[in-house]
Image: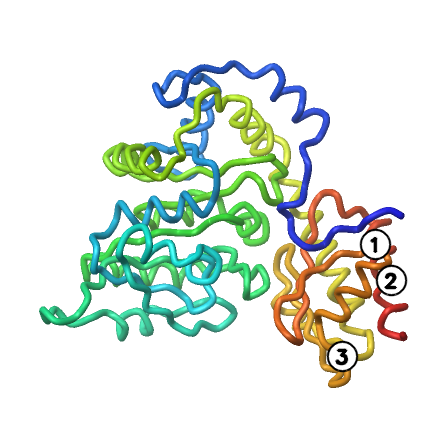
Amino acid sequence: MSIVDLRSDTVTKPTPAMRRVMAEAEVGDDVYGEDPSVNRLQEYVADLLGHEAALFVPSGTMANQIAIHCHTQPGDELICEAQSHILDYEMGGAAALSGVSARPLAGEAGVITAAQVAAAIRPPVYYFARTRLVVLENTHNLAGGTVWPLPEMQKIRDLAVSASLRMHLDGARLWNACVASGLAPSQYARLFDSVSVCFSKGLGAPVGSALVGSQEFIAAARRCRKRFGGGMRQAGILAAAALFALEHHRDRLAEDHAHAVQLAQALAEMPGLRVDLPRVQTNIVMIDVIDPAREAAAISAALKQEGVWVSSAGIRRLRAVTHYEITASALERALGVFRRVLKG
């Protein structure tokens, strides 16, 4: 039985062409700064995002946690949206690794406003935590892959400058946001003191993220990466995959977005389900189970028995994510299984 894996775009595997460049990659010891493939990747990403320097790291979580650690001091507070990845999926890393608390704000489709941020900044009174950092996420995962509007980001940036706050962007799926909006990565990234981007989701590289910022920031981040256990040796094998992904797989993300819309439209017509179609902006589809007699976990389990894998994102919510292994025929098969399961 063939599997249609819609759990996440992290399940993608390297293509044969990507495997070839990995096998042929020039390598050196990256802890010494001597891996030519890693150095090329870092220069490429820094230039692409319009920042001075970049650092290759094993994961997006590590990139975000390094950024938080370098921007703050223990006892500080960061502001983020209430369903942010750094809050829900990074195991309390800000508190555990950096001694930093989070002040979450409830956004609309994952987007918070400058007015909300302004109201959340702590007064300069000695018994309050010091507000130090604002973290935004684009695209926003739990909101369904929604894209941040650039003007609101700019307003928050202007506020941050006036309040002496730092700004970090969790751009794990920034590539999707750029394809959906038509904006260049640097147009988003220029508003932030640091940005993390991921290569192992829709781009299809097996491992890796990057963190960008100023030369001074990345020098501090390199020290922090070592402390967090992220120093790698002949990492050029992985960096070559990331470079290949950036050069060959970014534009094709539009196909994933189109498949997500097709999936969402078809699911929205099925009894017992609801999909907020305007929120399907990239490659993530959030599916609400409105049949009171059914729960998401049971539907997910029934789908899996027939070879269609989706994530349960709550008692009455499923999540499906398209990627380059979800072809038109795979999508058709998945929809057929959904129809059978919902009739059962």
Decide: few, some or many residues near mark 3? Use Cα within 10 Å; few <14, some 14-19, many ≥20.
some
Residue sitting at the far left: 126
Decide: few, some or many residues near mark 2? Use Cα within 10 Å; few <14, some 14-19, many ≥20.
some
Q: Callout 2, which amino acid?
A: Val
Q: Callout 3, which amino acid?
A: Arg
| Rendered residue at 16%/70% (across/down) | 128
Q: Which residue is mark 1?
A: 307
**Is 142 placed left or right of 92 in the picture?**
right
Kindly check if marks 1 and 3 are in contact, taking CB atoms under 8 A apart as contact: no
The CA distance from mark 1 to mark 3 is 20 Å
Decide: few, some or many residues near mark 1? Use Cα within 10 Å; few <14, some 14-19, many ≥20.
some
The CA distance from mark 2 to mark 1 is 8 Å
Q: Nearer the viewer, residue 140 or 209?
A: 209
Q: Callout 1, which amino acid?
A: Gly
Q: Is residue 77 above or below residue 176?
A: below
**Is 108 placed left or right of 103 in the picture?**
right
